[in-house]
Amino acid sequence: MIDLKKELKDVKYVAILGHIRPDGDCVGSCLGLYNYIVDNYDGIKVDVYLNPIPSCFGILENSNKIVNYIGFDLNDDINEFPKCIQGSYVRKEPYDVVFALDCSDARRLGPAYSVFKNAKKTICIDHHMNTDGFADVDYIIADYSSTCELIYNILDYDKINKSVAECLYTGIVTDTGVFQYDCCKAHTMTAAGMLMEKGIDYSFLIEYTFYEKSFKQQKILGTSLINAKRVYDNRIIYSYMDKAEMEELKASPKDFEGVCEKLRETKGVSTSFFMYRQPDGKIKGSLRGTDNNVDLSRVAANMNGGGHKKAAGFSFDDISMDEAVDIVIEELIKEYEIGNN
Ligand code: 5GP
Ligand code: MN
């Protein structure tokens, strides 16, 4: 466990970093910690660096203070200083303490790695299975519900204000699929319950950050479901969207949020995967599963990715979707055969 008070003693400059393509847990943990330090540590100047965040998280307090850097490719030169969106403030001098949140390895920081590398002291807080720890101080509990729950653990409850509670609650909700996935334990519910006591509008937060979709997203989901196919005795379901269809529907990466989960909900299915074409020509894929014997983080690790046992992500260079489908199915079946023997 991290003693936050001790880590922030005599500290003046703090940076908080999360992973590329930030999700609810990443944004919630970064802004939750940001709001907590701003509220409780008068003499500390804090900066948060993230890729542009999904718009639904714009309701979280101080989301407008995030320094948005662009460029989010895993193959980017991570030693390069982040190319920040014009007008954003970037401190070039080393920070006293830099937090890396919800990040399984340094590469996942993207170009913000340069801020991490320059730091006088680094702290990693994460819940991914394959995180070995890459900071001076690591607080990693594999398969914990979320980084937000870990942040909740290191904060002084009486000093958590409503905006901190909103951020942390949102991250717990999004990483547990609204308290559904098996990473959600009794202590997770306790943490969420204690955060509710701070007077947050939890029903609104769940609806706005998890369920609500734009009309366009619903159309994209519908098309993806219509295009879905099943293999391996109907236990694996998949769908994808390539460039032409994405252009036709004006679909961008953020519009695919939740599609893979919807595919997985199909009766009889234990694994789903969904892929789309990124603007740079690469393929980005997601894996979701329910089978305890099938470790999707291991499958993703063989395809330039990683993640959790039942939720993982991967990517391919510029290959055809048919080739990508064949590779993913082959890797999945390999994992099924290991798991079920
Ligand atoms: P998603 O499918 O939503 O992109 O990711 C699901 C989970 O896998 C998330 O916890 C995410 O952090 C992790 N993940 C996604 N892509 C990658 C990747 O390329 N590398 C690693 N290590 N983890 C990933
Ligand atoms: Mn997370």
Image (cartoon, rainbow, N blue to C red):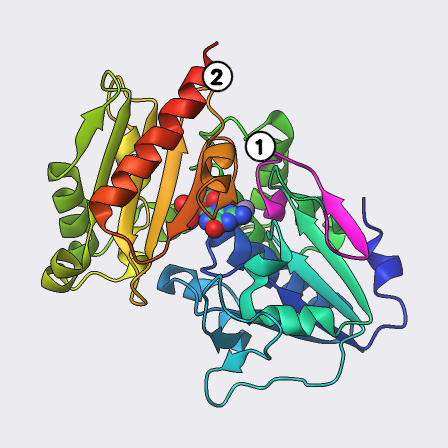
Tag 2, which secondary structure?
A: helix
As drawn, the residue found furthest toward the top would be 341
Q: Is mark 1 within 8 Å of ligand 2?
A: no
Label 1 is placed on what type of residue?
A: Met
Residue 73: in sight, yes or no?
A: yes
- Magenta span includes 145: yes
Q: CA distance from mark 2 to mark 1?
A: 30 Å
Residue nearest the viewer, comparing 17 with 76 = 76
Residue, disc 1: 189
Residue, disc 2: 339
Q: Quadrant of residue 42?
A: bottom right
Label 2 is placed on what type of residue?
A: Gly
Say whether disc 2 or disc 1 marks the residue closer to the N-terminus: 1
Tag 1, which secondary structure?
A: helix
Q: Position of residue 19 (x, y in %)?
A: 54, 58
Q: Which residues are magenta?
A: 133-149
Q: Residue at x 61, y 49 (%)?
A: 104
